[in-house]
Image (spheres, grey):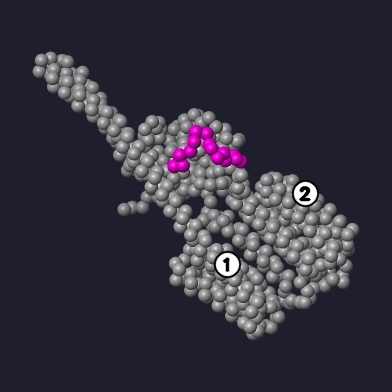
Amino acid sequence: MTPLPVPQRWLAALLGVSLLLDLVLLVGGGTDRSVLALPGAAAMAVCAWFGVSRPAIGATLGALTLTVSSVLIRVADVNVPSVGLTHIMLTELAAGTALVVLVVWRSPGFVAVASVTALVVSCVAAIVIRLLTCGSYYCFDSSSTFTLLVSSSDLFATLVFGLILLVAAVVTGLYLRRAAKQRVETEMGLLIRKQWPLGGALALLCLLELTELGNYTGVVSLAGSVFAGVCAFFAPKYPLRNAVLAAGGIVFAGLADGVSSSGYGEFSIGSTAACMALVAYLVRYVPPRQAAWGTVMLAGALVISMAARDSRALGNADIMFITTFLLLVGVATGWYFRARDRERNQTVKAAVTSAQQGERMALARELHDVVAHHVTGIVVQAQAALMVAGKNPDVALPALEKIERSGTEALTAMRTLVGSLRDGSAAWTAGTSDATGQATTDLAADIHGVLENFTGPPVELDLRLPPELPHEMGRSVLRLVQESLTNVGKHAPDASTVTVRVATVEDTLHIRVSDDGRKRPANPAGGSGGYGLVGMRERVELLGGRFDAGPSGYVGWSVEAWLPMRKDDK
């Protein structure tokens, strides 16, 4: 069974958690019939899931589902809990936001505008329809879990929050749309692409915290949670520094909340979740002693913050147990990923060592089969020339010509092998073509030749080479393109198009080969030795570049390399 792509797994987890929270809220804070609102929320989650592959259709179905669900809720007189948007369930909110991001990201402009408009109109209609159901006699107070409030101030807050959420979703979609068109991914873009699931989860928890604000003074605590979440989001780059900043922000927010006597409550779910993520990053990336100090510092910040809000918090066994347990979960998570990183590094090192050993054997065979063959011929011809030179000098002339020709061929082969070793390619194997075994003098012509001989799907070529390119770099570029196209033929038989880009970006030569294949066969045509990516990575790194290979979004595969064209002076 083919595993789901990572973004789809995270979206499924987010929708699943939202649905579970809605179920808890419906059972704990509603009437016996409140659970009848759950199928509509589940249908919205299904629409968001379908929107991953068909954004416009998913958004249309989501808008229709939200409207129909609201009518059924109105007919059945069902009360639903809301988070952020009045009368809109958490799952519906998460699914609608995801659909807005998806359609803006992956749909044409007109379709995206129409889809977002449909979602917004259906959301407003749902609020109005459910408002007629709930009436104004349900209100929120500190003793209930989630209840419904219908008042002018609440509707204004809903309007403001909905507008902020819509703008954030559209901006996120536009950012992803722009990033998809960019040829070179920045370091910040790579961090955001990897960290967005954590950012979404922390934003969801801050939404839950927002619903518990009793008055405006509690905004200080919410700001502390948001600040800690931002620190956790960027923690992979500087874990210890972000942990220190987050601890300071949590303590400051707790003290400010305690001085203002806002009655916010001693436990902050947003700050605690951010600390869990920070602890996990500390344990994963930082040396053990520093990770221990950072964990103690975060735990102390949470305790001080809770005690500042309510002096009785330290005596609350339940609160202290939950906080300790959550931090231990963060420690365990960090240990797990640290062990997995260590195991992966060992596997990569073993694979690289094995690939290098194989290339050494190939070089040894080439040296024996080519150079030794020419040298042996030279020795034989020289012996024959010596034997006949005294009696018939004219017969020795053809032998001398053969000796010269064999020596030239041997010298050429030796220079080629030495050149392969000097540029670190270690990719010469017996039987390779001239294009990959010798230095290229016309890279553009050689790349066109490789594409003409490619038997796979149509290739879109974007070729913008610098005026001058070192021979060893040209040979490496040609090798990367050829090996990537070979992998497309093996691993992406259903691909309809392949994009090849070799272009200069400032002082860097960027190579990208991507396909749109949806299925990766377990047994590729021709088999897979497993050394292709390892060899390409080694070649790029030995040239001082950066290499990346993996799924390109939800479908396809891409191989990218960045080779510096300007070397530092030695």
What amino acid type is highlighted by mark number 1?
Val
Q: Is any atom of residue 272 visible in this view?
A: yes
Q: Residue at x 74, y 50 (%)?
A: 47
Q: Say above or below: 406 vs 568.
A: above
Q: Position of residue 97 (x, y in %)?
A: 71, 57
Residue 329 numbered mark, or none: 1
The magenta span reads 516-532
Q: Residue at x 69, y 60 (%)?
A: 17
Q: Which residue appears at 52% of the width and 60% of the height?
A: 337
Please tell me whether mark 1 sits on a helix, a strand or a loop. helix
Sequence-wise, which precedes: disc 2 or disc 1? 2
Please indicate whether residue 401 sits to the left or right of residue 94 in the image: left
Which of discs 2 and 1 lies nearer the camera? The answer is 1
Rendered location of residue 157, percent (x, y):
77, 68
Magenta segment main secondary structure = loop
In the image, residue 336 sits, relative to residue 558, either above or below, namely below
Q: Which residue is mark 2?
A: 61
Q: Which quadrant of the figure has residue 354?
A: top left
Q: Is residue 228 visible?
A: no
Residue 461, image x and y in percent?
53, 36
Q: Amino acid at mark 2?
A: Leu
| Label 1 crowd (10 A; few <14 / some 14-19 / many >=20) | some
Residue 354, compared with residue 27, is above or below; it is above
**Does 198 appear in magenta?**
no
Circle 2 crowding by C-alpha within 10 Å: few under 14, some 14–19, many from 20: many
